[in-house]
Image (cartoon, coloured by chain):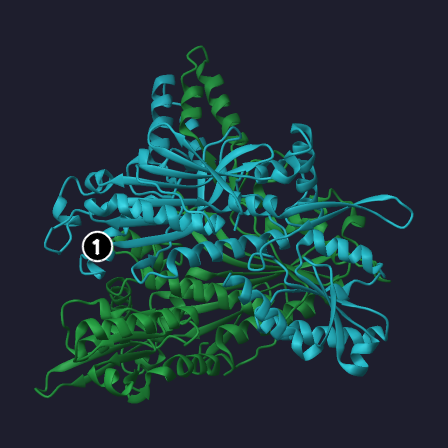
Chain colours: A cyan, B green
Amino acid sequence: MFSHFVKSALPRCEFTFTYTAWQHTRGWCGASTNLDQARTLLQLIVDRGFISPGHANVELFKRGTTCSYGPLGSELRENVLHQWWRSMTGSRQQVFEINTPSSSGSPDIVAGRWGHLRIVEPDDVRNVLNETELSREQLVHSVRMFLQRSPLLRTNLIQGALEQFVPLFELVNRKLPFGIAETGRCFQPSQDGSAEVTHGSLVWFCSPRTSSQWLDHWARQRLKWWRKDELEEVASRGVKIYYKFPWGQEALEVLSSRGDCELLQMHKGVRSKFQSRDGQKSVAHIVSITGNIDRGLLAFLSNSLQLHNREDIKQKLHQRKVLKLHPLLAPVKVALGIGRGATMELRQVCEGLWQELKEAKISAWPGYLETSPVPMEQLNSKYDEMGVLFTAVISENTLESGLLQVRSRDTTIKETMHISELNNFLSRYISAADNM
Amino acid sequence: MFSHFVKSALPRCEFTFTYTAWQHTRGWCGASTNLDQARTLLQLIVDRGFISPGHANVELFKRGTTCSYGPLGSELRENVLHQWWRSMTGSRQQVFEINTPSSSGSPDIVAGRWGHLRIVEPDDVRNVLNETELSREQLVHSVRMFLQRSPLLRTNLIQGALEQFVPLFELVNRKLPFGIAETGRCFQPSQDGSAEVTHGSLVWFCSPRTSSQWLDHWARQRLKWWRKDELEEVASRGVKIYYKFPWGQEALEVLSSRGDCELLQMHKGVRSKFQSRDGQKSVAHIVSITGNIDRGLLAFLSNSLQLHNREDIKQKLHQRKVLKLHPLLAPVKVALGIGRGATMELRQVCEGLWQELKEAKISAWPGYLETSPVPMEQLNSKYDEMGVLFTAVISENTLESGLLQVRSRDTTIKETMHISELNNFLSRYISAADNM
């Protein structure tokens, strides 16, 4: 979905793909404008309710961690997750979906693989601290032991897939390759204690001799998904896909060839447990793909912001801000507003239309609920900043002839169409964008 | 979706709605058969890959907490979540979706409202414990202070909605009522340290004089959703919807009228922040609806299991187990199997069909990937236990005439239809069930 990546070699056989955002601004401005752009973007995202206001929340968002998303951000996040999932599981019959807890209290899990963060009930610690007969040394020991028994929070989704490997391997009659996919929250240590990230994960089990081909396959597939036109050859232990944000470059997705050591460790070296039934008796090797959905969402937003300067009639300079989000990702496909006419009747028409669109799974913004009249130009700016694909205005004219005006975000051109055509028009528009 | 609830009054104005499951077995059996049924259900759920094997995991599942779900359980969970969400947000324009982190490190949050569980990085505790110059008393104090600064894990989704109240109230021009909906994982203290639950939550803000009507409205709506025919009158502080499992009664959903104290507390008594713009200047009151999705899933499974005894030709007694899950909830809508004929060619036909169904968002089970031949009767039992709505068999005949055999889970009747009709037939069947 991005239009241009660059490639550069990293040490340890890691290839890097970076999309240079803001290229169009780079020709004529320096770092400060980059930061201006960043500020404009973050301000817009808060103003339009993609995320909750507040410095701490914006910081979480900027870091690519889970923050408090408002209505538009939630819908966008859902859309990104859905498209990510579709691209990973859509074309393959051998990908199984799982869903696992984000914490584990099991005593036989290996802490290192799960991460370090633990869930603690402070009352229980207080009980330990209140044991007055314990010496200082005994107290330290008790607190340590208590922590060691506390449930661990996951840092990634790979552990869940490893734990479900055996029953699913049996389900596919021990035939390789197959994959286990999951999306969900993970917890990572950070300077403030801990940070949540939403991961999308595919753990792909294949024979050892095909693992580098599979890494190559998935890297191509993932590049195609993130960007959709350029393919790069990769054949190595790992691949990272980066995005260049105005404040620096960050990884969106990590692909790695992990060999069989994790399965060996889990099954205490008993290879027969993960040996395939084919002639070769291949031992399952792992290729993992982990995408950061929160950061992906931020990259899509960054990449879609376009700024246009223009003068109004009085020669005052205005900046038009448009979030040109992909039609599949745009959180709102159409805003329904009302023009001149009997408000009550127009609102009724809008409500019927809103319901119809809802049933067709086309998310519509009920602009007609707005009670104070707002000039159309101002509304259009607002909807452009929300990334709304189309704005439909229902007026007196609609009550008489059934005709309404539809304005496109991308062309700003207004078209007249019959109210009965809107649903179909939008569905066709969105699926056409899907097939591009 | 359940067929019978009973009502009984609870103290403190709480009404209780209970669905007596297993009624058909109760006429002729006692408690031990109930437990047999429970055992059969849990065994089936593990055998068919709804959840991962293992005693600890089954216990989590039985308690209505988040466990490790296999492919069928994940899909079922998605379907339950989707239908829950649809029922809460589908018909109302004033319900906003949000998505918030499950932990908070903010110093000004009120611990009591968030719960007590905290996220701890053990290395940081170890640093405190290693400060040798501290006396025993100072050490206890340091650990206490450390805990107090650690991020809290949420126990429910209400806090997130309260935090987003102000910007969303502005978005709707301070007009009541409106709602904030979220689904996500919450953490609750349990005997093993902590347990995760998946909640669905709607926090509904309305004027004080309408709050009991809204509680009544939502209680009716929720009862209708969980069961779909009987309405009960409620007008009180709270309502619980229970399900009677073979091992006892448990709450699926809790509705409560919460007044304005939480908003008052949050905004330190400044009423103007949550006063509506209408003539009455109403202060927003809260009605909350919290559903336990994991337990709901278990209730749907419990409720759908049917056992039929029958004799085979040799007069041996067999038990037919069928999961009669609602067509919208069934994780697999159709299983594609192959009959007699050239395996390679038949498989190709199946793969094409699988793709076509996938694109139409009808989940199909790739039974044709099965390499060892299994008698059709055995396959049918397996698919019945998986709750698969239909089984389609592609054979030699299909290659010649395009005809295939489709067996229904609910009637066990086999029909012949043209391969090009299958997609349409399934879509129509599922949407017919939706409109019932």
- Amino acid at dot 1: Leu
Residue, far top = B133
Count all numbered tags in the image, as a single digit.
1
User: Residue A254 at x, y = what percent?
Assistant: 40, 40
The local crowd at label 1, few if under 14, some if 14 to 19, many if 20 or more residues have their Cα within 10 Å, is many
Q: Is residue A14 above or below residue B361?
A: above
Residue, far left = B314
- Considering the numbered disc 1 on the image, is that residue within a helix, a strand or a loop? loop
Is residue B45 visible in the rendered structure shown here? Answer: yes
Would residue B276 be found to the left or right of residue B165 on screen?
A: right
User: Residue A208 at x, y = what percent?
Assistant: 20, 44
User: Residue B118 at x, y = what percent?
Assistant: 48, 37
Toward the viewer: B177 or A337?
A337
Determine the residue positioned at 28% across, 74% down. Answer: B349
Toward the viewer: B344 or B236?
B344
* Residue placed under numbered mark 1 in the picture: A176
Indicate the chain on which mark 1 is placed: A
User: Residue A189 at x, y = what percent?
Assistant: 46, 32
Q: Is residue A222 above or below residue B364?
A: above
Would residue A206 be found to the left or right of residue B135 on screen?
A: left
Would residue B402 be found to the left or right of residue A383 on screen?
A: left
Is residue B168 visible in the rendered structure shown here? Answer: no
Toward the viewer: A276 or A65?
A276
Quarter occupied by residue B246: bottom left
Determine the residue positioned at 52% across, 36% down. Answer: B151
Determine the residue positioned at 61% across, 76% down. Answer: B233
Determine the residue positioned at 39% across, 51% down. Answer: A221
Q: Is residue A147 above or below residue A399?
A: above
